[in-house]
């Protein structure tokens, strides 16, 4: 069964460093998403991506964040200069073309900023 | 803005007990409603969904009915198993011009004891 994969499973970084979180969505999906969950809090929407551009983003997704689909299979989330409060679980998701199809989620990357 | 409120966990039940996890929502439009489940070490999986008022979603013995009058989507199961131990997330997707971005509740951790 096709699945969304994410790497790494756990990333530890120093404050101020850049991190790139990687996701491989399901191959025939066209909509891509990043969500995050700070420990003990809600899963929060960050950004959606369609047709090689951001289609929607939340207030959390400021200038420190960027997304890219560099090669037609990977979907990356970059944080330019990490802050302590960026420590969270980051989930990638993808879905097919039809409206309100199920979003398929990856297992998440736990980001720890020291 | 739109929001989802779930009952606080953790919830601990004995095998074969009846489960209810309450979920209420606030939305200005007519959202689709979802329950996602996260098993330990895995990503979020869609458990069930309902796209309009009075729809009942069901899967693996779990049920939830979209109640517009009470803005609720409570999750129920008649007889839980140890394998149901997981974190359950209620979510909505607002149809108004979005890419189907999901708004999640905080999640409810369920532990089922043999």
Image: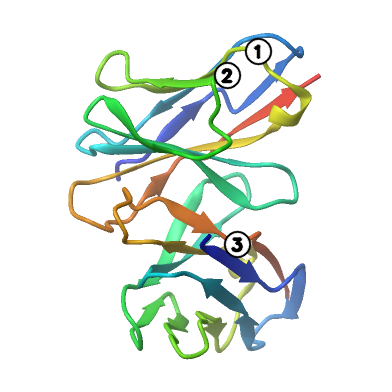
Per the rendering, the mark at residue A64 is 2
Q: Position of residue A36 (x, y in %)?
A: 58, 40
Mark in the foreground, 1 or 3: 1
Horizontal arrangement in the rendering, residue B70 relative to residue A72 (left or right): right
- Residue closest to the far right: A114
Quarter location, residue B22: bottom right
Q: Describe the element under mark 3 as helix, strand or loop.
A: loop
Establish whether labels 1 and 3 are both on one chain. Answer: no
Circle 3 is placed at which residue position? B105
Sequence-wise, the earlier of marks 1 and 2 is 2
Q: Position of residue B62 (x, y in %)?
A: 48, 79
Q: Position of residue B16 (x, y in %)?
A: 64, 86
Circle 1 is placed at which residue position? A81
Q: Describe the element under mark 2 as helix, strand or loop.
A: loop
The CA span between labels 1 and 2 is 7 Å
Chain letter of mark 3 equals B
Q: What residue is rendered at 54% in x and 84% in y?
A: B77
The local crowd at label 3, few if under 14, some if 14 to 19, many if 20 or more residues have their Cα within 10 Å, is many
Q: What residue is rendered at 55% in x and 89% in y?
A: B78
The local crowd at label 1, few if under 14, some if 14 to 19, many if 20 or more residues have their Cα within 10 Å, is some
The CA span between labels 3 and 2 is 26 Å
Compared with B65, A94 (above or below) is above
Compared with A35, A109 (above or below) is above
The local crowd at label 2, few if under 14, some if 14 to 19, many if 20 or more residues have their Cα within 10 Å, is few
Most foreground residue, A19 or B28 = B28
């Amino acid at each position: 069964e096709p699945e969304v994969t994410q790497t790494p499973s756990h990333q530890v970084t120093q404050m101020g460093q850049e991190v790139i979180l990687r996701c491989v969505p399901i191959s025939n999906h066209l909509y891509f998403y990043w969500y995050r969950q700070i420990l003990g809090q809600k899963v929060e929407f960050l950004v959606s991506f369609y047709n090689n551009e951001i289609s929607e983003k939340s207030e959390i997704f400021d200038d420190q964040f960027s997304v890219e689909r560099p090669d037609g299979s990977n979907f990356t989330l970059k944080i330019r200069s990490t802050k302590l409060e960026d420590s969270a679980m980051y989930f990638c998701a993808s879905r097919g073309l039809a409206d309100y199809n199920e979003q398929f989620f990856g297992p998440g990357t736990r980001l720890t900023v020291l | 803005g739109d929001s989802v409120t779930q009952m606080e966990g953790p919830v601990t039940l004995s095998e074969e007990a009846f489960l209810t996890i309450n979920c209420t929502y606030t939305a200005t439009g007519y959202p689709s409603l979802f329950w996602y489940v996260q098993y330990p070490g895995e990503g979020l999986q869609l458990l069930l969904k309902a796209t309009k008022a009075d729809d009942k979603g069901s899967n693996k013995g779990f049920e939830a009915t979209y109640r517009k009058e009470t803005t609720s989507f409570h999750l129920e199961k008649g007889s839980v198993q140890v394998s149901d131990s997981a974190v359950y997330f209620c979510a909505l997707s607002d149809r108004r011009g979005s890419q189907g971005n999901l708004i999640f509740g905080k999640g409810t951790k369920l532990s089922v004891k043999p």
